[in-house]
Image (cartoon, rainbow, N blue to C red):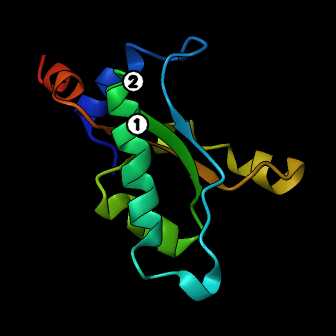
Amino acid sequence: DADPGIERWLAARWPPAEGNGPYLCNLGVLPARRRQGIGKALICACEEVALRWGYDAIHLHVNWQDAGAVALYRAMGYCALPAYDPAPWQVRWLGAPTTRYHVRLISGTGAAQLTS
């Protein structure tokens, strides 16, 4: 699923320096309110704030077993980067979270860097 351009863009910025960009975490919608566009609206609001603050990407982790969340982020243009997944043995033996790192470029500046 990972776009090579995004992987190049990320590699030039990894690991992120402290304060090097917005990280979306702990976003949730009540089960009774899901599939009504609330999650998408919240994510869009976060992206708008990040753009106003001058950032060109949003970073997040999502539980890869949460099909609804994975589908939402994919539909919104977030790219999964499995190279940053915890190793299977870490999940099984150490209880590491089953999360996958995602990134989305939200400005023309970041998107332009993908082609260079």
List x then y, in percent, for residue 12: 37, 13
- Whether tag 2 and tag 1 are in contact, CB under 8 A, the answer is yes
Left or right: where does residue 89 sit relative to residue 16? right
Amino acid found under the numbered disc labelled 2? Trp
List x then y, in percent, for residue 106: 28, 37
Secondary structure under tag 2 reads loop
Toward the viewer: 41 or 93?
41
Q: Does residue 77 appear in this view?
A: yes
Name the image quarter holding the C terminus. top left
Toward the viewer: 80 or 91?
80
Toward the viewer: 41 or 14?
41
Give the residue drawn at x 68%, y 56%.
98
- Label tally: 2
Amino acid found under the numbered disc labelled 1? Val
Residue 49 is tagged as: 1
Q: Is residue 107 above or below residue 38?
A: above
Secondary structure under tag 1 reads helix
List x then y, in percent, for residue 61: 57, 47
* Residue of label 2: 53
Q: Is residue 80 above or below residue 115?
A: below
Q: Quadrant of residue 113?
A: top left
Give the residue drawn at x 34%, y 41%.
48
Residue 33 is tagged as: none
